[in-house]
Image (cartoon, rainbow, N blue to C red):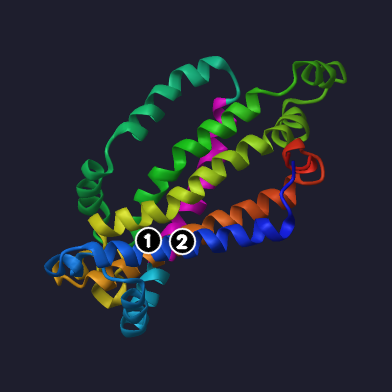
Amino acid sequence: MNAHPLLRRLLPALTGALFIALWYLAHALLASERRFLLPPPHSVLFAFRDHGPVLWSAAMNTLQGALLGFGTAVIGSSLAALVLSLTPLVRASLYPYLMILQLTPIIVIAPILILWAGAGIVSVTIITFLICFFPLVVNTTQGLISTDRNLVDLFRMCRASRWQEIWLLRAPGALPYFFTGLRIAATLAPIGAIVGDFYAGNSAGGQGGLGFLTIIYSSQFKIAALFATAVSSCALGFLFAGGVVALSWLCLHRWHDSYSRSDV
């Protein structure tokens, strides 16, 4: 049964109000000497007022690293997926090394990147790329090799070239898989940029991002400002995820079942 449209709009607001009420309650129940560890929501708002320019600058630096890493991951994974989709032998040869790349902890890779590329936006971009790359390439490859066999046989009966088969049949059919990977990568991109900035960030010339700001506020015990930094990071995540959801809707809503059917 479909929920009433007005109720669907009110429920998120009611849930948010309940969350804020519970937040105030948790703050009040803490012992007085420990309440500074959980500042109330209005203190976080005051932190935005007091540290707004710094938070904005850091968020823009993090956004830059996230966009660069995410964009290069989309391009690199698309090319890699095309190569991996060619034959099972290619996948068997290369896939284990993709797994190794994914399973190597960022905390180990970050010092190496700093030595190679130096601290700053380049290292942050590479770290974001590494975090976003794997889900994109796996989902896109799966989409390219999951094309309906009957349609593939039809193309080959019509003597379509290999590139015609890829661009006119396999690539359009892989779009839902691609956008699934894109959604995963979109949620990981801001996290990757913040983690990269935490380990490889550089505040010289005002280039520090939210990860670097987290270190500063934590060392200074500015808990409300730390919460404001977390909210800013969450807002970046929503920005990325919302952009990908909108893009996937534009590309798929006219023909794919996930958009053409109403919610049950």
Amino acid tagged 1: Leu
Mark 1–mark 2 Cα distance, whole angstroms, equals 6 Å
Q: Which residue is mark 2?
A: 18
Is residue 123 at all visible to an observer of this figure? no
Q: Kindly check if marks 1 and 2 are in contact, taking CB atoms under 8 A apart as contact.
A: yes
Toward which corner of the image does residue 49 lie, by quadrant? bottom left
In x, y percent, where is residue 187? Answer: 47, 50
Q: Residue at x 45, y 36 (%)?
A: 134
- Front-most of 132 and 54? 54
Is residue 263 at all visible to an observer of this figure? yes
- Residue bounds of the magenta highlight: 62-84
Q: Secondary structure at mark 1?
A: helix
Amino acid tagged 2: Leu
State yes or no: residue 217 in magenta. no
Q: Secondary structure at mark 2?
A: helix
The quadrant of the rendering that contains the N terminus is: top right
In x, y percent, where is residue 101? Answer: 35, 33
Q: Which residue is mark 1?
A: 22
Query: Quick check: 151 left or right of 218?
Result: right
In x, y percent, where is residue 79? Answer: 56, 38
State yes or no: residue 71 in magenta. yes
Q: Residue at x 50, y 21 (%)?
A: 91
